[in-house]
Image (spheres, coloured by chain):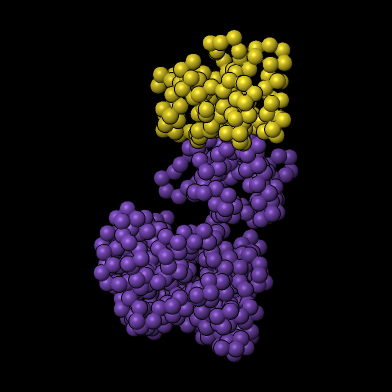
Chain colours: A yellow, B purple
Amino acid sequence: MMVKQISLFLENKEGRLARVCRILGDAGINIRALSIADTSNFGVLRLIVNQPDTAYNILKQNGFVVDITEVIAVEVPDQPGGLAGTLEILEKKNINVEYMYAFLGTTSQDALVILRVENIAGAVETLEAANVKVLEGEEVYSL
Amino acid sequence: MPREQLKDLQLERLRKTLERVYHNVPFYRQKLQEAGFEPGDLQSLDDLQKLPFTAKQDLRDNYPFGMFAVPMSEIVRVHASSGTTGKPTVVGYTRSDINTWAELMARTLTCGGTTKNSVIQVAYGYGLFTGGLGVHYGAERIGASVIPISGGNTQRQIMLMEDFGTTVLACTPSYAIYLAEAMEEMGVDKNRLKLQYGVFGAEPWSERMRQEIEKRLNIKAIDIYGLSEVIGPGVASECQEQKGLHIFEDHFLPEVIDPVTEKPLPFGEKGELVFTSLTKEGIPIIRYRTRDITTLKAEVCSCGRTHVRMEKVMGRTDDMLIIRGVNVFPSQIESVLLEIGDTEPHYLLVVDRKGSLDELEVQVEVSQAMFSDKVKGLETLEKTIHHRIESLLGISAKVKLVEPHSIPRSEGKAKRVIDKRSL
């Protein structure tokens, strides 16, 4: 129930993001979702791609500091209060969300969000018990 | 030897040295005359401050034999530096100097733990460089079994270490690490080696590097210190307590000076190490500026030795920066980064002046070990580096994390400083 997320360190200067995208594009890797957390000096780019291991190796070969982090992908009802309901399920169990971002494309009626939590197994169990759909890595990469 | 007695001995020997250089070395005669000092003026060791300094350049200017205090017929050995930055600096030894040197190296090795039962592999280079022959003569003086293999030829070094049952390794600390790596690659079982300890010197090395050598070779790593202008190895050595290097003060008079004002500093303060030789005949040296930065301490060591100790040398005045009046060495920043990261850090110090205030920016390449995909983690890293620099140096530096390989590499010595100030 885990999704491999690629995260890498980027300096805040022009052309760096474009360079990452170009490297991945040239390797035939498709970006499914991304988020950038930034400060005035640097940013952390987080990516969900169709081939995480290949992307990791290629970025590493190109000299980036890159890591694979495990996150979970969750379907939330695409309606007002949909996300709130899902987050409240976690909150009740004291599971803290470290960061999250939305997934770009989906096939169902629902929206997809990526969640990074400390206790992945606990979060998955809690969400499933509340009938929230948690996606497998393979499902996400091939969306 | 009690310190009062030692001081008397030093004074007597200093007087002889001054007589020798005044009468035999035109360079010193002129320097002393300029300073208005004659050998007879020497009253106490405090008069040392009135004597002129000797710099490396003085040896170069007097290339090759201008600093010698005896005729060539008295010289039995010549050593020289590699001369990578110009003419080499040449030093000469009389028979008595060679004897003294062997005695000092025997002390150095005994300090570390060498006995007549030791098998010592001398992997310092032999030749014009003082390391190989220096250790060699000292080890023979003790009566240890010497393997004079010299530097390089790593596989052979390891084979002999195994087959001859080497107990003491003598080489540069970086070569010790290299040997450890080579053993790991070759699959050598280190438990089968008889190595007990190593004497390492000829380049500055950190405490961290010591820990690495000790762990990887499963030995005790002893720091030894010397430089050819003073005599070679055998100027100072750590004992097994590893709490600073005992300076052999009956032969060399140490001082620590402020590198800028050139004024002597009291014990305990960090500054540039300066040596005056007390017994050398071939090339006596007066107040030689080593460029090495250290601190002297007078307390008696827990091993019982009474000679003054110097701290491990970690920096040189050549790469010292003065920021808001504070002396800053790249090696100090490096030690902070080494504590935090896991590998050798790539960093750059950028100094600029904003208004009337100096600003220091420390650029640090983020390594895999430092990276966190949480912004908070990286900000904590920046803050930690900032705080540690502040507590170590007392100045506030701006820390900037940069991508790997974004700091330019150089083929030789790494460039660590960009000083944009126009002073």
Front residue of A97 and B101 = A97
Front residue of A1 and A49 = A1
Front residue of A130 and B321 = A130
Front residue of B37 and B203 = B203
Q: Position of residue B303 (x, y in %)?
A: 55, 80
Question: At x 34% / y 81%, what residue is drawn?
Answer: B117
Q: Position of residue B17 (x, y in %)?
A: 51, 82
Q: Residue furthest front?
A: A129
Question: At x 47% / y 78%, what residue is drawn?
Answer: B111
Which of the 4 image quadrants contains residue B8?
A: bottom right
Question: At x 61% / y 34%, what residue is drawn?
Answer: A122
User: In the rendered image, which quarter contains the N terminus of chain B?
Assistant: bottom right
* Residue B381, placed above or below residue B35: above
Q: Number of numbered discs present?
A: 0
Report whether B60 appears left or right of B150.
Answer: right
* Residue B229 visible within the image: no
Q: Residue furthest right?
A: B356
* Residue B154, placed above or below residue A47: below
* Residue B73, placed above or below residue B391: below
Question: At x 58% / y 78%, what residue is drawn?
Answer: B301
Report whether B95 appears left or right of B374.
Answer: left
Q: Position of residue B184 (x, y in %)?
A: 34, 55
* Residue A89 visible within the image: yes
